[in-house]
Image: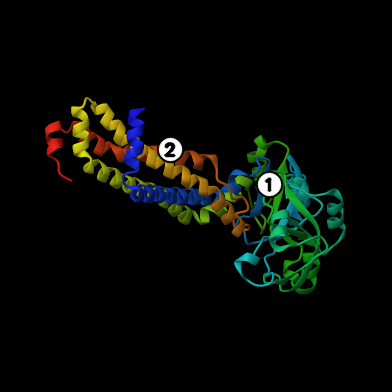
């Protein structure tokens, strides 16, 4: 109990220095938490991928389309439960600013919500979507971001598919859980295909990729091989892979950036260590004579080490706690600012555990040298110490 009182008194000796050190550690932990959340959110689609979904795309590159005629053939492959498809539409809504960008996909309204059961859409809205050719379905987060509501018309200027397009919102889907992407817009592929017949005949009856739902995830590999074998001699050869592998291929394109951010997050921990170590070394050097006096009064080396390590741990843990406390609102605000880039942006338990673990580790490491020096110094040498 006496040691705890002494630790508390030592912290209050230089209030400004202690406060600035705690603030520095808090900011570093906050930066670490934000960077780690960006890293985990960037690859969240990979972790959230369903085990029973396969993606079939063009073997050469994702940008090349596949014939619509493949759909009926894919449905006949053994092990296939349901087949849907989608095409990337892109286009420009209002302007090319980042805040007005969101995924716009031409899909098969009859099957898209069957292969993506995590997207919850009321039955009446789905019926309207199937019947109305220029209708669209949007995610809840997208509706909140742009204040879209049912009945609104979303004008889009085409780029991949030129022309002025208008999509009527007939439904708003919600995610089954927090891992579902609620920032997308789905519209009827037939609407796109009809326009292509008139203006872009070369793109008629073409789809971007197929989504295959298998009846048994354990058969994913054999189904993939069977699908690709169908078109091995076709001009439009296919590459079929699990949804997780498909998502990973996109994440890997920015792998260098993500790896750099991860390295920076660990560098921040090193900064915490140096800041705290400098503070503890300064405090210990100033109190060498006091520690020598304490030893003459009967305090052991264990007590001296406890004073130094306790102060170091208290500062590091308090700074870490403050940093973690602010991490949650900052990450929430960051996620709301970039909803389409990070559909799921939440601080993961692993990030919290790492921040707490590093705070403790930094507190221990920062106190090792000054604690050892003070504990091993002879009393007479300590009493001679000045400053």
In the image, 238 versus 314, the foreground residue is: 314
Give the percent coordinates (x, y) of residue 257. 47, 56
Dot 1 surroundings within 10 Å: few (below 14), some, or many (20 or more)?
A: many
According to the picture, the residue beneath numbered tag 2 turns out to be 357
Is residue 193 left or right of 182 when viewed as pictured?
right
Give the percent coordinates (x, y) of residue 144. 71, 58
Asked which quadrant contains residue 62, the reply is bottom right
In the image, 346 versus 241, the foreground residue is: 346
According to the picture, the residue beneath numbered tag 1 turns out to be 227
Give the percent coordinates (x, y) of residue 60. 59, 58
Report if residue 40 is visible in the image: no
Give the percent coordinates (x, y) of residue 28. 42, 50
> Residue at coordinates 23% horizontally, 34% vertically from top-left?
372
> Residue at coordinates 70% horizontally, 36% vertically from top-left?
216
In the rendered image, the vertical position of residue 195 relative to residue 141, given as above or below: below
Tell me the CA gap for discs 1 and 2.
47 Å
Quadrant of the image containing the N terminus: top left
Q: Tell me if label 1 and label 2 are in contact, CB under 8 Å.
A: no
């Amino acid at each position: 109990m006496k040691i705890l009182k002494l630790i508390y008194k030592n912290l209050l000796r230089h209030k400004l220095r202690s406060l600035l050190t705690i603030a520095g550690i808090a900011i570093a932990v906050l930066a670490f938490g934000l960077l780690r959340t960006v890293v985990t959110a960037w690859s969240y689609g990979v972790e959230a991928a369903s085990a029973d979904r396969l993606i079939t795309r063009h073997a050469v590159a994702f940008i090349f389309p596949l014939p619509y005629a493949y759909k009926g053939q894919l449905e006949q492959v053994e092990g296939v439960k349901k087949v849907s498809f989608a095409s990337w539409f892109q286009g420009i809504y209002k302007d090319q600013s980042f805040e007005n960008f969101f995924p716009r996909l031409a899909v098969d309204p009859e099957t898209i919500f069957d292969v993506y059961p995590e997207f919850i859409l009321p039955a009446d809205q789905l019926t309207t979507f199937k019947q109305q050719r220029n209708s669209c379905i949007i995610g809840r987060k997208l509706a909140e971001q742009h204040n879209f509501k049912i009945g609104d018309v979303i004008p889009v200027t085409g780029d991949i598919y030129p022309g002025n397009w208008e999509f009527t919102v007939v439904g708003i889907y919600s995610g089954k859980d927090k891992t579902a992407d609620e920032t997308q817009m789905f519209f009827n592929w037939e609407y796109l295909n009809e326009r292509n017949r008139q203006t872009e005949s070369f793109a008629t009856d073409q789809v971007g990729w197929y989504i295959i739902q298998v009846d048994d995830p354990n058969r994913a590999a054999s189904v993939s091989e069977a699908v690709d074998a169908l078109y091995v001699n076709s001009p439009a050869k296919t590459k079929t892979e699990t949804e997780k592998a498909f998502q990973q291929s996109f994440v890997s394109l920015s792998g260098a950036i993500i790896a750099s951010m991860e390295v920076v997050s660990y560098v921040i921990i090193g900064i915490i260590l140096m800041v705290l170590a400098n503070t503890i070394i300064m405090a210990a050097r100033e109190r060498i004579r006091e520690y020598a006096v304490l030893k003459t009064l009967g305090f052991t080396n264990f007590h001296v080490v406890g004073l130094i390590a306790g102060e170091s741990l208290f500062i590091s843990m308090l700074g870490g706690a403050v940093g973690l406390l602010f991490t949650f609102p900052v990450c929430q605000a960051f996620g709301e600012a970039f909803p389409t880039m990070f559909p799921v942006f939440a601080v993961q338990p692993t990030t919290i555990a790492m921040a707490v673990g590093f705070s403790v580790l930094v507190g221990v490491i920062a106190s090792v040298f000054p604690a050892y020096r003070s504990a091993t110094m002879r009393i007479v040498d300590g009493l001679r110490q000045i400053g």
